[in-house]
Image: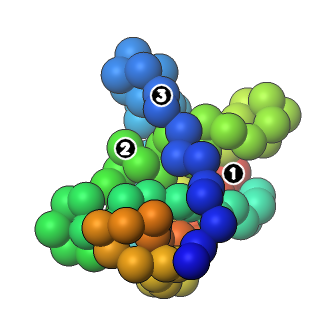
Amino acid sequence: MANRVWIPEVSEERLQKLGEQIKKVKDPSRLKPLCDITTHHNFASNGLNNPTDEEVLAAISQVSANVLFKAMAWKMIEPPTTVGEAGFDGYQTARVRLYQK
């Protein structure tokens, strides 16, 4: 049985503001890595077995204000892994890297 993990609920307004500031990128080669975070999300919440952008932004919203101030982009660097059982107490995690200029 997996340990329960809190998946943050974040208002639509907050997600929109974060999405305007911190963009998903495919090629961050011109950006400087800031930090890596672990996201926690529901199973296949977007049908592709990856966290939705909103789930990633909700995870990003939990980092320190100093990191949030510097962050301008993000990219998933490790695919989701499953913890527990789908439909029970399980969830998935993924690694996301935040970038700055």
Which element type, helix, strand or loop, lies under badge 3? Answer: loop
The CA span between labels 2 and 1 is 20 Å
Q: Which mark is residue 54?
A: 2
Name the residue nearer the viewer: 39 or 5. Answer: 5
Circle nearer the N terminus (1, 3): 3
Which residue is pictured at 53% across the width and 71% down the height? 93
Q: Position of residue 98 (x, y in %)?
A: 64, 57
Vertical order, 65 against 53 (above or below): above
Residue 28 appears anywhere in the view: no
Q: Position of residue 91 (x, y in %)?
A: 45, 67
Which residue is pictured at 76% across the width and 61% down the height? 35
Residue matched to label 1: 100
Which element type, helix, strand or loop, lies under badge 1? Answer: strand
Circle nearer the N terminus (2, 1): 2
Residue 69, quarter of the rendered image: top right
Residue matched to label 3: 10
